Image: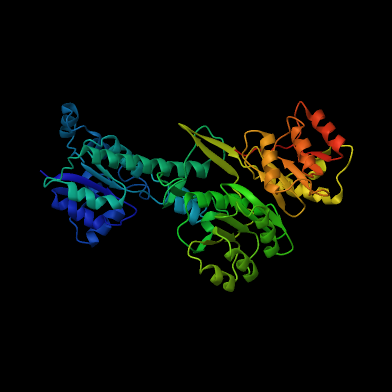
Amino acid sequence: MKKLALLSVYDKTGIVELANGLIDHNYEIIATGGTYKMLVDNRVDVKRVSDVIDSPEMIDGRVKTLHPSIFAGILAKRKNEKHMNELKENGISPIDVVVCNLYPFYKAAYEMDMEEDDVLEYIDIGGVSLIRAAGKNFKDVIVLVNPDDYKSVIEEMDEDGNLINILKRRELATKAFTYTMGYDSLISKYFGKEIFADNFGNSYRKASDLRYGENPHQRAALYRDVFYKGPSFFTAKQLHGKQLSYNNIVDLEAAKDIILEFEQPACAIVKHSNPCGVAVSDTIVDAYRLAYIADPISAYGSIVALNRKLDLETASEIKSNFVEVLIAPDFDEDAYSMLATKKNIRLIKYNEMQNSVSSIVYKHVSGGLLVQENDTIEEDDKTWRIMSEREPNDKEWRALKFAWKVAKHVKSNAIVLATEARTYGIGAGQMSRIDACELAIKKANAVGSYTGGTAMASDGFFPFRDSIDMAYKAGVSCVIEPGGSIRDSEVIDACNEHGMALVFTGIRHFKH
């Protein structure tokens, strides 16, 4: 007796070959509208589902397979005598293979930019139900949602059309449920705009596998949110160099976010998600030079981000250093040609770089997900409070604002020493604020030489005056921090004793 296979697919890749393979393995084929037509056009022996169940497709094709004869045939347990007797009494044939993929909802909602009423027509009903039913009864029913699996299933069938390997059946069911989960998540995200909803959907599709993760023994992949329409890494174009690594992409994002803080020509040099040098100037080549000399040792093997087109002069400066990745909004042809001679540098043209900072940040924890708004608050310096007896002069104000913009992008505890145009020393990711201060001063590579306009920015408040005393000895003349410590008065007194200007922003910028 022949087995029964139901084919109902939107993506018809490989469907003719699969149908013929199933026929060769003792299957009778039934199919819905478009699938039926394609098989007939290719001279495959096939019956309409509507003929088998004696019920026509209805409501403009919205109802095709939603019928007890179909779902009983899929869901009946073959070893359950009661189930099989009920099928026999009602003249229903078991369905042993279900091949189904769904209307392309993500294309309609994201790529084709349709009106809502048109998008709703791309929500698959019967197909999802078929897949779920077959997946639920995977021990008796083979479910296929991906054309890539067609060939292997046919090759593993015995001459009677049985797929004996239960692990293979389970693997196919897993793919089926993952497929419908992603599909439902896309629909949920289309309808729901609430970030912190009770159920967190998934609208991510794999863009590519990566060579490895943070370390060579860790697997990694890159996924794209199909509903995010703004400029992003995915709208950038790699012009030269080998595939980006997991760490490259993380650092690239960090560097890009920093230079977006500035309207002037700006350069950020990043290592391990932290800036080692940031600078602005009237020209992009000067911005690069200033950022590089801030910490040339750490700049080795770094990511360099520019917010202006790469010109030949800047390319000449960069060529003499080891840079992993260079991103810029554009490249002069001769500048590109010069750097493209370097085998190991990746050149990334970051189109529409402005306003490309993600609004939401996700971090995984064991068994769950942390979700927060990104730290993109727009600060009004008119709300900042001068806490010291001495007000900052104009040069110090510019240095304070520059240092504060950079500090937001440094891992906590964070200390940034800077003038109005560039960083001198950055202390990042330290367990105590005094350690971060000490590291920033060490990175600045001198003590007592930056008087007159050198600012110190701290992402969080100072719990004690020790960092202020240390900064004063290093030549810092002004300090900017959130304030809010129970010992704020101690810090204010220290600044007054040293004649330093102190500004409280009222905003904390921790970055973990």
Q: Residue at x 64, y 56 (%)?
A: 354
**Quarter occupied by the N terminus:** top left
Q: How many marks?
A: 0
Foreground of the two, 427 or 261: 427
What residue is shown at x 52% (from left), y 42% (from top)? 191
Compare residues 101 and 433 and report the one nearer the observer: 433
Q: Position of residue 334 (x, y in %)?
A: 58, 73
Q: Position of residue 142 (x, y in %)?
A: 24, 42
Instruction: Determine whether, in the image, residue 85 is placed left or right of residue 401.
Output: left
Q: Is residue 224 visible?
A: no
Foreground residue among 63 and 303: 303
The residue most toward the right is 389
Q: Which residue reaches farthest bottom?
A: 334
Residue 308 appears at what percent x and percent y?
A: 65, 63
| Figure quadrant of residue 315 | bottom right
Residue 193 location, quadrant: top right
What colouring method underlies this structural image? rainbow
Report if residue 80 is visible in the image: yes
**Residue 120: x and y, percent?**
46, 47
At 75% from the left edge and 45% from the top edge, which residue is drawn? 447
Please indicate whether residue 248 sits to the left or right of residue 267 in the image. left
Q: Name the image quarter holding the C terminus.
A: top right
